[in-house]
């Protein structure tokens, strides 16, 4: 499984990028995206998102 990012809500702040222990999150067209192949679904990114765009 991988976290899900709602691109309609994401504001592109990149707060989640540095917190990800596997480097699975990146920015694409000013929105966060998750590489499902490397995401371990740890949830570290969820509480740092200021607009709650990330969910499990």
Image (tube, rainbow, N blue to C red):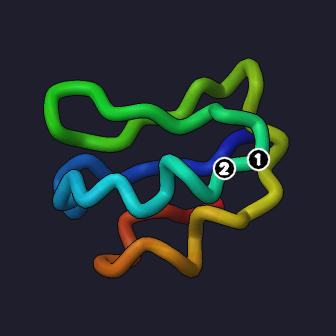
Residue 15: image quadrant is: bottom left
Q: Residue 27 or 33: which is nearer the viewer? A: 27
* Residue 6 screen position, x and y as percent: 33, 53
Q: Give the vertical position of 49 relative to 19 (above or below).
A: below
Residue 47 has which mark? none
Which residue of the protein is positioned furthest toward the front in this rendering? 18
Q: Give the side of residue 29 with respect to residue 20, left or right.
A: left
Q: Quadrant of the N terminus?
A: top right
Q: CA distance from mark 2 to mark 1?
A: 4 Å
Residue 20 has which mark? 2
Residue at image coords 30%, 78%: 51
Q: Give the side of residue 13 with respect to residue 50, left or right.
A: left
Q: Give the vertical position of 40 relative to 26 (above or below).
A: below
Categorize mark 2 by other alpha carbons within 10 Å: few (<14), some (14-19), many (20+).
Answer: some
Q: Residue 24 or 36: which is nearer the viewer? A: 24
Categorize mark 1 by other alpha carbons within 10 Å: few (<14), some (14-19), many (20+).
Answer: few
* Residue 11 screen position, x and y as percent: 17, 60
* Residue 27 screen position, x and y as percent: 33, 33
Residue at image coords 24%, 41%: 31
Q: Give the side of residue 50 with respect to residue 22, left or right.
A: left
Residue at image coords 16%, 38%: 30
Residue at image coords 59%, 25%: 35
| Residue that numbered label 1 is attached to | 21
Secondary structure found at label 1 = loop
Q: Are marks 2 and 1 in contact (CB under 8 Å)?
A: yes
Secondary structure found at label 2 = loop
């Amino acid at each position: 499984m991988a976290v899900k990012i709602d691109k309609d809500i994401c504001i592109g702040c990149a707060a989640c990028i540095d917190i990800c222990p596997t480097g699975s999150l990146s920015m694409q067209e000013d929105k966060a995206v998750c590489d499902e192949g490397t995401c371990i679904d740890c949830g570290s990114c969820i509480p740092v998102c200021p607009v709650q765009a990330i969910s499990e």
